[in-house]
Image: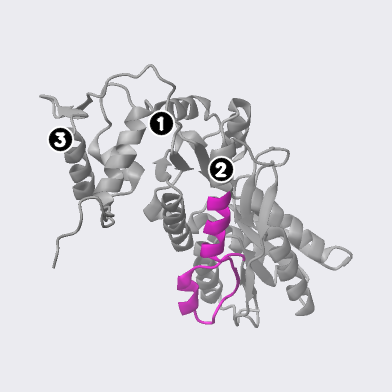
């Protein structure tokens, strides 16, 4: 058999995760994301969402290419010469969250993985920045420091409140909100249609004879929670005998149980609960069972969201399930359009979750 002609087509080369990581770091250094030295390995692993061994293989490749050198203090100094040409446009799309990936709901983790895959296919890398300070009531200093230190083509905000959103509006940085914007904030957003889901839940509970409904939600003016409240109010509108009780808790089981205890002892206790966070459904159901309440005979329970662990609850929980794959497609499409054009219409894209009939209503 004759050897292949040197002028013929070369077989495709498989690119390892370490190679992709090295390429992402190379592009970030060329774009001037870091000055002087790279951040530590722990920060880079968290930002790039790769293992320590993968990161070290990528750093070794950059060192062999002469782009890095290790100093006596074991810091990696950037050796690439400064270029006076126009800066390379960033190929990084950054997620900003107050919670690390492992602390997110399972559906959010799946969505981030699918988002990373879709962005990688389009030539973008995904970074995750976790900062509690950026989600405070006065986030300006922390946000300024982060966005200066780690420029990105697009910032994707997870679970943000109005002060964070308003800062991105003032700075005019390309930004996409995963969730709902605060009232009057002109940013593009992608979220489940909580208003429609809760309107459906309220109508369902009314048909089952419930007139006193409690909405159980975390404290804080998250757009999706406000939309949920509005949807329930719309479902109860026109019925003078119906009422909505909003229980805003601090996300601890103790506070949530104390609010439920007070509500059950009131002259007109609720007969149905709509729970705005899946993890709190377990707290609500176990508390009601401790108080001798039968579900659904004495108290109906509806989960506004869905997570895999609800499938193992007894009785099965009535809930609303949004598709993680569909969510990732919409977010990646919007993020890529924003990265390529620099702008998106400041509109809300809403995905209607599927109603999952359980046995708690």
Q: Is residue 271 at all visible to an observer of this figure? A: yes
Q: Nearer the viewer, residue 212 or 203?
A: 203
Name the image colouring: one colour
Above or below, comparing residue 32 to residue 18 in the picture: above
Spot the residue most to the left.
72
Residue 282: x percent and y percent?
Answer: 50, 69
Mark nearer the N terminus (1 vs 3): 3
Horizontal side of 57 relative to 264 (left or right) equals left
Residue 5: x percent and y percent?
Answer: 20, 55
Residue at x 40%, y 19% (from the top left corner): 85
Helix, strand, or loop for circle 2?
loop
Tag in front: 3 or 2? 3
Helix, strand, or loop for circle 1?
loop
Chain part drawn in magenta:
304-333
Horizontal side of 83 relative to 136 (left or right) equals left
Residue at x 63%, y 67% (from the top left corner): 353
CA distance for labels 2 and 1: 19 Å
Neighbourhood count class around disc 2 (C-alpha, 10 Å): few under 14, some 14–19, many 20 upward:
many
Residue 329 forms part of the magenta stretch: yes
Residue 135: x percent and y percent?
Answer: 51, 37
Image quadrant in which the N terminus is located:
bottom left
Residue 1 forms part of the magenta stretch: no
Above or below, comparing residue 314 to residue 308 in the picture: below
Q: Which residue is mark 2?
A: 160
Q: Which residue is mark 3?
A: 64
Residue at x 16%, y 39% (from the top left corner): 60
Q: Which residue is mark 1?
A: 150
Q: How many marks?
A: 3
């Amino acid at each position: 058999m004759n050897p292949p002609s040197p002028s013929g087509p070369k077989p495709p080369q498989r690119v390892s995760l370490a190679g992709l990581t090295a390429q992402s770091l190379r592009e970030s250094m060329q774009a001037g994301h870091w000055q002087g030295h790279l951040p530590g390995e722990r920060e880079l692993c968290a930002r790039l969402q790769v293992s320590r061994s993968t990161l070290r293989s990528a750093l070794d490749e950059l060192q062999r290419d002469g782009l890095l050198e290790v100093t006596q203090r074991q810091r990696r100094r950037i050796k690439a010469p400064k270029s006076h040409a126009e800066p390379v446009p960033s190929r990084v799309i950054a997620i900003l969250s107050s919670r690390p990936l492992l602390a997110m709901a399972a559906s959010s983790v799946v969505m981030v993985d699918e988002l990373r895959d879709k962005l990688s296919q389009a030539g973008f890398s995904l970074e995750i920045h976790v900062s509690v300070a950026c989600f405070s009531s006065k986030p300006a200093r922390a946000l300024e420091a982060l966005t200066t230190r780690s420029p990105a083509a697009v910032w994707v905000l997870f679970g943000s409140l109005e002060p964070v959103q308003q800062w991105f509006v003032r700075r005019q940085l390309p930004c996409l909100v995963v969730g709902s914007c605060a009232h009057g904030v002109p940013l593009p957003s992608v979220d489940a249609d909580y208003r429609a889901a809760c309107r459906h839940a309220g109508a369902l509970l009314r048909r089952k004879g419930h007139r006193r409904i409690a909405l159980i939600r975390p404290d804080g003016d998250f757009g999706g929670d406000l939309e949920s409240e509005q949807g329930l109010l719309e479902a109860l509108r026109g019925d003078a005998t119906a009422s909505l009780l909003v229980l805003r808790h601090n996300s601890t089981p103790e506070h949530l149980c104390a609010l439920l205890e007070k509500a059950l002892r009131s002259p007109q206790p609720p007969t149905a609960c709509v729970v705005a966070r899946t993890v709190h459904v377990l707290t609500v159901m176990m508390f009601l069972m401790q108080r001798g309440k039968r579900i659904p005979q004495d108290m109906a329970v509806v989960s506004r969201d869905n997570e895999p662990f609800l499938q193992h609850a007894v009785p099965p929980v009535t809930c609303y399930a949004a598709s993680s794959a569909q969510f990732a497609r919409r977010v990646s499409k919007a993020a890529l359009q924003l990265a390529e054009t620099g702008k998106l219409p400041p509109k809300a894209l809403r995905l209607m979750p599927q109603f999952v009939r359980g046995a708690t209503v």
